[in-house]
Amino acid sequence: MCVVRRTWDWAAGMTNTLHRYGSGESFNDDYIVFAIPARGINDKGAVEKQRRFLEIARKHKPINMGDASHGSIFRPSKELNPTVHWRRDPKRDFDTVVHCVSCPSTVAAVFDNPDQVVAFIKELRQEDLGLSINISAALDKAQECARRAGLERHSVEYSLGFFGQTDRMADRRTLELSTMCGHGMLSFDFVRKLVEWVKQGRRSPEQASATLARFCSCGVFNPTRACRLFEEARVGSGIRGQGQVAGGPHVKSVEAGRT
Amino acid sequence: MQIDQQKCVACGNCVPVCPMGAISIDPVRNRAGVNADECVECYTCYRGMSMEKLNPVLVRTIRGLLKVFRLRFDPEPDVCPTSAITPDELTWPRVVRRAFSDPQVTHESTGVHGRGTEEVKTNDVTNRVGLGEVGYVVEFGRPTVGVRFRDIEKMTRALASIGIEFESRNPVTHLMTDKKTGKLRDDILNEKILSAIVEFKTRIENVPAVLQKVDDISKTLDTVVAVGVSTRCAEDGSSALDPVLVEEGFSFVRGKTNLGLGRGND
């Protein structure tokens, strides 16, 4: 007897963007705006509002978009033609994301530019959907976007990083890429493989980024940031910024002293 | 998850894709196989990889010929050429693996969707975490390390011992046989999952003691623990949690910011 079922009726808490790994500077091109209804309170009629959220988002040119239950603009195919190995379809399927929303869920749009985020939030204010709208980003950048849009933040959630056996985690570059899917769909081994392929010239940063994006099922993967990280890996740079590291082992764990 | 041995051509594409490293090629049989004890039923291989439906015999023959001449085809890295990845029909208790590892499913026994609740993402509507209160999300096994429930139970028991009351709508709470002690069901303790979240809230003055307890117990677990804390902001957007975290030696760069645009149905 199979007692697992898909979450067609309701899916919450699925964005999982809190613990992305990287320095503050590393998040300069990473803004996720998502909409979520509160279960049992304002989830009736939420599907149409979520579709509207995605339609508005699309006007502001997001780099990714998704629905926690049905996937992102980057999708794997179950019926590939063998010629795909020579010409992988780069199509980004925004229409399917909008049309597939069928249950109250978390819908998200990813941006690489704060000006687009501000314009998007301003339009959301005018639209007054009534859904909870959150920004997952560097905290100071998110607050700046909110204020530029005429809002003060209502609540805030902080990532305090990783505790416990942090030696079981991957190297910093792998973590920066892998943690862009908070559900853990991007394995350390697969990220390392693609980094090596980019360094060897077997795939471009854009191709490697799109490959990873297909594994993130809720559309919060940031392909722009991934391309940059792959390119930094290719030329042997990256690992920039000497500031605080989000998602890094917290200071007490590594006994680096208090900040 | 299983690899159909009739279809597998041992291309190895699925091997690095598995977050738990549970897939490998058997050198004798020359087929991929899944270590069932390590597999967390996350469906990353099945759902994330694209599929072709090539004839396995044909593919093996071509690969064999290429191998003779030390040539190697350079396929797309996220493609299973013969659609060999096959889901199992899961029964209790193994089914909890998928419920906590595959982001697109839930488990009927918990009655809760996803790994956690809405945290403060809907706090503007629910007021779950009020002024002077702090919400916690303690996540085990993330990123991509995995965890067994017996390690989670060590933490829930320790937190219960200092008076923590667990979030009632959280999936892990639903698996407790005694919410006062943090005891989990015995039949799931050895099940391995990709990650799980324990949620609760306290008054802000309890933050140092709670985080110290989480830190202490985390060191005894065979996994990593990602910790998030949240609070309601003042009208000017300021957070009373900032100075507390700084005083405790925590740096924080990234987070989620609720813009306060939600409201109940009219």
Image (cartoon, coloured by chain):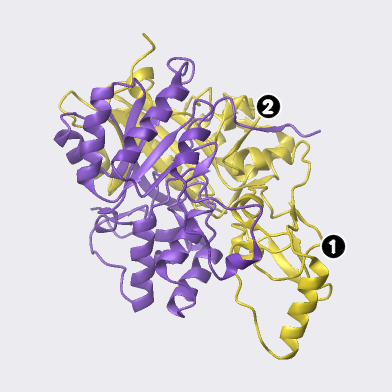
- Counting residues from the start of the chain, the first of labels 1 and 2 encountered is 1
Q: Residues within 10 Å of mark 2 (few under 14, many from 20)?
A: some
Residue drawn at x 30%, y 60% as measured from the top left: A256
Q: Percent x, y for residue A173?
A: 40, 66
Q: Amino acid at mark 2?
A: Ser
- Identify the residue position indicated by label 2 in the image: B109
Look at the picture and state if A170 lies above or below A127.
below
Q: Residues within 10 Å of mark 1 (few under 14, many from 20)?
A: few
Task: Name the image quarter holding residue A108.
Answer: top left
What letter labels the chain drawn in purple? A
Q: Is residue B92 left or right of residue A85?
A: right
Q: Percent x, y for residue A16?
A: 44, 42
Q: Is residue A198 left or right of residue B177?
A: left
What letter labels the chain drawn in yellow? B
Look at the picture and state if B69 lies above or below A142.
below
Residue drawn at x 49%, y 25% as measured from the top left: A104
Can the viewer see residue B165 in this picture? yes
Residue drawn at x 17%, y 23% as measured from the top left: B235
Q: How many marks?
A: 2
Look at the picture and state if A109 lies above or below B237.
below
> What chain does badge 1 belong to?
B
Which dot marks residue B6? 1
Residues flagged by tags 1 and 2 on a common chain: yes
Which dot marks residue B85? none
Q: Amino acid at mark 1?
A: Gln
**Which sits in the foreground, A18 or A234?**
A234
Instruction: Report how far apart the C-alphas of labels 1 and 2 lie in the structure.
Output: 35 Å
Task: Name the image quarter holding residue A174.
Answer: bottom left
Extreme-bottom residue of the structure: B69
> What chain does badge 2 belong to?
B
Q: Percent x, y for residue A96?
A: 50, 40
**Which sits in the foreground, A91 or A115?**
A91
